[in-house]
């Protein structure tokens, strides 16, 4: 059965250490100055001494109705058999149309290959071998959960059943496959 | 950029080269329309206008495509756009529209050029050889009207395509603006078609400015400018004010509105009676306005 991979980001557990950012760069040889994922701080809330801050991990949202896939003129951006949005480096000509279409700024031009690059959920290197993406396995706070939503027994399915997962920019109709849990943070 | 604290700067994926390409494709479409419609329907003879428009179309579309290829992440793989087709992608469809237009404009440009050369030869000498050569070229001239006719469709296609390319990005609030709130009708293709016709006509007239009475063309351009003013006003009222208030505001008001539309329109009213001498400034400003418009739209859609 086809998988429906998801990543769940439990914001209350993220301490902003950037271990995910670094693990991703090492795992995927991401060029200098570019990021497949990064976890910037959100706006500081409140006034001293009652202040709060949280971090929001950013990466490809693995949309089920991905604007990047529909605009791509060469079908280089595509959904693989497990619903993961990927870029076929060989077909990509680097027109960057997908970058204008992506509302999450998840894509960048890889100057070393000339093709567009982004998070792959570590599909080739990890997930297809039964492992978890580099960012998930390295996360020190246990803020990241990865799994198959088509499997009701997976950790991801069970977690989402108990907690309210929200997606980024739902109004755009992109149907992201990455969920954010805001429980325990001051939004 | 600071990964943790730096507010991520909105980087633009499409920059100046794309804006210039959209502008040149518009010029090419408008110039071809000017030349071919004159060729097909005008009772008066405007050989210089036809030549100017036909040559301008070839040069601008080829330079435009060159910029487009250079702007790719992998310029040498541009041919993959012709092999891997995604019918759901406006750009993929556009590749074929623009390629068709380029081919037609090259053929048309050649036919216009060869007939001009032939006529010159006949004028210069009556030596048998050259007359024979000229008449051999006349056979091809039978294709000129059909090529012009088909080219009209492709030039309209090219000019509107530059708008559809941007308006098809549904996640972009500015580019995706609908026409008068009608969700099925995107705004930019209409605006870019009018702007292309206006700037293409203006650029063609620059190339033909020292020939006869161009009053008819100037009147058409005035109508197009007025139409564009109405469209720009509609756009201004249909989108959120932030798009016209950011760092691109100066370019919009100065480049698009004042230099591109208001001043040329006023000068045209003045010049229509005196004609000839104001063609260069009027048309020059219209062309600058068209370039400003493409820059403004391309950047505003990505910055805000």
Image: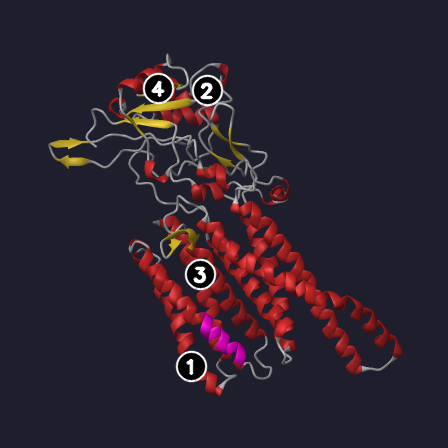
Residue A120 position within the rendered picture, expressed as x and y whole percent measured from the top left: 46, 27
Is A126 located above or below residue B301 in the figure?
Answer: above
Share a chain, discs 1 and 3? yes
Which residue was labeled with disc 4?
Answer: A145
Whether residue A80 is in magenta: the answer is no
Magenta highlight range: B216-224
Q: Is residue A109 visible?
A: no
Q: Earlier in the sequence, mark 4 or mark 2?
A: 2
Say what secondary structure mark 4 lies in.
Answer: strand
**In the rendered structure, are the residues bearing label 1 and label 3 in contact, judged by CB atoms less than 8 Å apart?**
no
Q: Are marks 2 and 1 on the same chain?
A: no
**Left or right for A179, reference A24:** left
Residue A71 in the image: x percent, y percent? 49, 42
Q: CA distance from mark 3 to mark 2?
A: 45 Å
- Badge 3 density bin: few <14, some 14–19, many ≥20, Cα 10 Å: many
Q: Are marks 4 and 2 on the same chain?
A: yes
Residue A3, numbered circle: 2
Residue bearing mark 1: B269
- Looking at marks 1 and 3 on the same chain, the residue that comes earlier in the sequence is marked by 3
Q: Measure the C-alpha gap from mark 3 to mark 4.
A: 47 Å
CA–CA distance in space, label 4 to label 1: 68 Å
Q: CA distance from mark 2 to mark 1?
A: 67 Å
Q: Chain of mark 4?
A: A
- Residue B295 is labelled as none
């Amino acid at each position: 059965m086809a998988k429906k991979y998801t990543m769940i980001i439990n914001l209350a557990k993220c301490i902003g250490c950037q271990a995910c950012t670094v693990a991703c760069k090492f795992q995927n040889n991401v060029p200098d100055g570019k990021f497949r994922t990064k976890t910037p701080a959100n706006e500081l809330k409140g006034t001293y001494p009652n202040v709060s801050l949280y971090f929001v991990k950013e990466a490809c949202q693995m949309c089920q109705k991905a604007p990047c896939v529909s605009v791509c003129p060469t079908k280089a951006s595509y959904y693989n058999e497990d619903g993961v949005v990927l870029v076929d480096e060989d077909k990509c000509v680097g027109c960057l149309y997908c970058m204008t279409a992506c509302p999450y700024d998840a894509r960048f031009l890889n100057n070393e290959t000339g093709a567009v690059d982004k998070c792959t959920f570590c599909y080739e290197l990890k997930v297809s071998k039964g492992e978890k993406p580099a960012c998930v396995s390295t996360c020190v706070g246990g803020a990241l959960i990865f799994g198959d939503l088509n499997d009701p027994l997976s950790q991801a399915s069970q977690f989402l059943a108990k907690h309210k997962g929200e997606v980024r920019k739902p109004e755009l109709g992109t149907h992201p496959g990455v969920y954010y849990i805001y429980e325990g943070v001051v939004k | 950029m600071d990964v943790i604290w730096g507010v991520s700067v909105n980087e633009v994926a499409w920059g100046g080269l794309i804006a210039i390409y959209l502008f040149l494709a518009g010029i090419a479409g408008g110039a071809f329309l000017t030349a071919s419609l004159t060729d097909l329907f005008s009772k008066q003879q405007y050989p210089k206008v036809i030549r100017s428009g036909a040559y301008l179309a070839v040069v601008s579309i080829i330079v435009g495509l060159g910029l487009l290829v250079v702007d790719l992440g992998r310029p040498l793989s541009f041919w993959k756009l012709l092999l891997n087709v995604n019918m759901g992608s406006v750009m993929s469809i556009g590749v074929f529209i623009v390629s068709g237009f380029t081919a037609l404009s090259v053929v048309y440009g050649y036919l216009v050029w060869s007939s001009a050369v032939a006529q010159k030869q006949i004028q210069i000498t009556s030596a048998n050889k050259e007359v024979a050569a000229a008449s051999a070229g006349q056979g091809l001239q039978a294709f000129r009207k059909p090529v012009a006719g088909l080219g009209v469709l492709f030039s309209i296609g090219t000019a509107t395509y530059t708008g559809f390319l941007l308006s098809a990005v549904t996640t972009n609030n500015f580019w995706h603006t609908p026409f008068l709130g009608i969700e099925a009708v995107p705004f930019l293709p209409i605006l870019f078609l009018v702007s292309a016709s206006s700037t293409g006509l203006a650029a063609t007239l620059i190339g033909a400015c020292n020939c006869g009475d161009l009053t008819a063309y100037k009147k058409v351009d005035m109508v197009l400018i007025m139409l564009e003013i109405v469209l720009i006003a509609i756009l201004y009222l249909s989108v959120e004010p932030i798009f016209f208030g950011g760092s691109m505001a100066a370019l919009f008001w100065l480049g698009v509105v004042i230099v591109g539309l208001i001043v040329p329109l006023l000068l045209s009213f003045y010049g229509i009676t005196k004609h000839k001498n104001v063609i260069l400034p009027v048309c020059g400003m219209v062309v600058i306005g068209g370039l400003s418009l493409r820059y403004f739209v391309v950047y505003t859609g990505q910055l805000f």
